[in-house]
Amino acid sequence: MFINREQEINALEQMYRTRNAEFFVLYGRRRVGKTELLLQFCEDKRSIYFLASQLKERDHLRQLIEIAQHVLDDPLLQNITFNDWESALIYFAQKSQEERLILVLDEFQYLCEDNAALPSLIQRFWDLHGKNSNLFLILCGSQVSFMEREVLAERSPLYGRRTGQLQLMPLSYRDSGSFFFEYSSKEKLIIYSILGGIPAYLNRFAQHSEVTSKRTIEQHIKEELLTPQGYLFDEVNFLLRMELRDPRTYASLLQAIAGGATRLNEISQRVGLETTNANKYLSVLRELGLIKRETPLTERAPQKSRKGIYKISDNYLNFWFRFVLPNRSLIESGNADLVYQQMIAPHLSDYMGSIFEDVCRQYIRFYWEEKLKVAPKQIGAHWESNLEIDILTENIDESHWFGECKWWEAPIGENVLNRLIAKAARVPDKWKQNPRYVLFSASGYTDALKRRASKEDVILIELNDLFNETSLAK
């Protein structure tokens, strides 16, 4: 299943239609959908897609010739041997003069394992031959740190050669929900809170739902995360080992954050590290996009703020470190039912709270036109002693949205709006101008609040609004 990615496909198509040589770099975390994006782009074009593995260079070059034989009408390929990557790239640049040719080198980091000088060889090829050809060269990699350091960074030999680059990010909550048309809006959000926007994980749940009748979320969790043979049971370790040489300390930090430690001193104490060392490790996790540091939107110097808190950026990592890792012994002993019923189900609603807030901010950022009708310039939250506002925005019309997000089983009443109005009056003066109010509820609103909202121009958002749906899926 291929969902959305229209903007990314359109960007590649626009580059393809130029008459210039193109050198594009695509990277992103494991399973985010890079390969599928490239396959979709190359589907109807003259292209050579090469997926590297952990082999010797000679084996890679031999495989490349075998793939090229199926694409290029060149009898000489039966007898050609590429002795090195530079000769291979020169050959493809020459073949591109006849007709536009796409050459994709996927999992580029593996090619460099056996030849650390490959970026320098590509630089020389591009400067002498590639940039004057009709070749569309794409380097793709799943090791984010490697791609940023060895391909994109200023110290890289390839710096300044690329004509475009993209870090492919996870899908939004709404695009993630497109995998599950048979689920209700609430079920889609729960699945998103478990898997995040990683297409490979979403496909796993979706495929299993198609095999038989619709499966419950409980069944998905048990089969994919709470059994040792489950697809997602050990995926975190693969992800961390790909990016980090010694992932143990990083895993401890992630577990601490998932367990509720959000401030630097809390995290360092729980892990047993000095704050200086903990900060260094956290900086690496931030660079990889696995965690984020948030400060109140009202802070004048966010980088220096002592109010900063750490959160895990990826929902799957968050869920795994919160519920799977602490119960690994029970899971490996075959106690999936026990873990779900006693360790997950009673705490799932609490876990959903912060995820729901993030989803609501996504809605304001990406889908504001549907009900809010005004674009936000900045969006975040506000907190200080005895005060917390889930959503605070600064809008292009100089108004400010104040928002509250409730993942409750019961409808929201007027008391929630009253408290929000009172809290909005306590923010710094700059943020009080033209206040507006928006509420997000997982279980609807009382009739009294609906009547008041219509009179006072308060926006009420329900779960179906988040997916722009008019009725729940059956």
Image: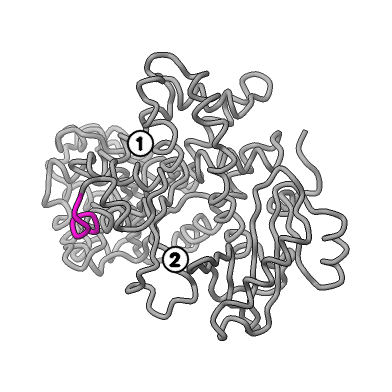
Where residue 122 sits in the image (x, y, percent)?
19, 56
Residue 258 among magenta residues: no
Determine which quarter of the picture holds residue 357. Answer: bottom right
Task: Report the residue marked by disc 2.
Answer: 18
Quarter of the image containing the C terminus? top right
Residue 274 among magenta residues: yes
Q: How is the image coloured?
A: one colour
Quarter of the image containing the N terminus? top right
Where residue 121 sits in the image (x, y, percent)?
14, 55
The answer to the question of whether label 2 and label 1 lie on touching residues, with beta carbons closer than 8 A, is no
Total number of numbered labels?
2
Classify mark 2: residues with Cα within 10 Å, few (<14), some (14-19) or many (20+).
few
| Residue under the image location 74 percent in, 65 percent down | 371
The residue segment tinted magenta is 273-279
Q: Earlier in the sequence, mark 2 or mark 1?
A: 2
Classify mark 1: residues with Cα within 10 Å, few (<14), some (14-19) or many (20+).
some
SS of the residue at dot 2? loop
Whole-number angstrom distance, CA of label 2 to CA of label 1: 40 Å
| Residue under the image location 46 percent in, 58 percent down | 12
Determine which quarter of the picture holds residue 448. Answer: bottom right
Looking at the rendered structure, the kind of residue marked 2 is Thr
- Residue 101 can be seen, yes or no: no
Task: Report the residue marked by disc 1.
Answer: 236
Where residue 39 sits in the image (x, y, percent)?
45, 42
Work out whether residue 384 or residue 192 is closer to the camera in this orientation and state it: 384
| Residue under the image location 65 percent in, 48 percent down | 407
Where residue 341 sits in the image (x, y, percent)?
55, 24
